[in-house]
Image: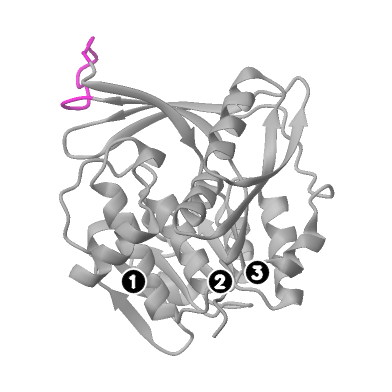
Amino acid sequence: MSRRPPARVICVGVATLDQIFRIDRLPVPPAKIQAQEFIVTGGGMAANAAVTVARLGGRAAWWGRLGDDGVGDQILRLLEVEGVEIRVQRLPGARSKTAAILVDAAGERLVVSAPAQGYPPDASWLPLAEVAGADAVHADSRWRTGALALFDVAAVQGKPSVFDGDSGDPEEILRLSRAATHPFLSEPMLARYDTDPEVAVRRIFGGRNVAAGVTLGGAGVLWFDGRTLHRSAAFEVPVVDTLAAGDTWHGALAIALGEGQSVEAAIRFATAAAALKCTRFGGRVGIPVRDELNAFLARN
């Protein structure tokens, strides 16, 4: 029997350069503090999702925009090292996004971002014909024009599409959510529709959705398939760093769907990947590889 080739997943959206400091506790009141550990690594929702796909054995692509600056150069090198295929628009005079992040002993974080500047919304340069050769697509909420273009082509091609709805204008996020087959929002974003997650998940469901839901950290995942509300439990792990856990979750969901896993199995797979990431410091650095994830799932 021939072996199925690795799933190909295209991820569209933001990529950043993260400077991460590990400290005992977040400073209140303001103070000078000594970091226990410091690293510089890649970040960004779509970029981290692409790295997740690559580490889990898939063929990953990241499509996005960067400034024509030194930060952008570093972001690209860090993606290339992971084996991610890149389609990028370098923008002269624009500033690539960077962030300084404090991670405390409980794994919680404080993020200070220097946002990208000079990125136009235009998505006409995207090589959307390549979606035909993908098994799934993923987009974040940071580049809405690109996400919508990707989801529209994926729908024509019959490909599953994962939307990471982290933040933004509720009407725009709802439009993008319904353009994808599998939108999963952050808890704060979902609360913009209703403070009761069960009510809110039902409200966002529509359009092309196969399943729509919310990631709830240690409380697991709540999702709706148009008929029934489902809950998927979280895995109990010692939490070291939650940075990039949501990105890992969405990237793992995308590759699982691209491999043909059921929604229920794909959510369990993604939740396990995010749990393993939380046991390690360093944002993207802690994203697991496939053998680690398979062993973790076998134990649990």
Q: Where is residue 133 in the image (x, y as percent from the top left)?
A: 72, 67
* Residues shaded magenta: 23-34
Q: Is 65 positioned to the left or the right of 258 in the image?
A: right
Residue extending farthest to the top is 32
| Residue at the (23%, 71%) spot, across then down | 298
Q: Which amino acid does the dot numbered 1 rest on? A: Arg
Precedes in sequence: disc 3 or disc 1: 3
Residue 131 position within the rendered picture, expressed as x and y whole percent measured from the top left: 73, 64
The kind of secondary structure element at disc 1 is helix
What is the spatial separation of the Cα atoms under label 3 and label 1, in whole angstroms?
A: 24 Å
| Crowdedness near tag 1: few (<14), some (14–19) or many (≥20) residues, C-alpha within 10 Å | many
Query: Can you see residue 9?
Result: yes
Dot 3 amino acid type = Ala
What residue would you read off at disc 3?
A: 179
Q: Is mark 2 on a helix, strand or loop?
A: helix
Q: Is residue 31 magenta?
A: yes
Residue under numbered circle 2: 258
- Sequence-wise first label, 2 or 3: 3
The residue sitting at 31% across, 49% down in the picture is 277
Q: Where is residue 251 in the image (x, y as percent from the top left)?
A: 48, 58
| Residue corresponding to mark 1 | 268
Regarding residue 195, the answer to whether it shows in the image is no
Q: How far apart are marks 1 and 2 (CA)?
A: 15 Å
Q: What element carries label 3?
A: helix
Q: How far apart are marks 2 and 3 (CA)?
A: 18 Å
Tell whether 116 sits left or right of 284.
Answer: right
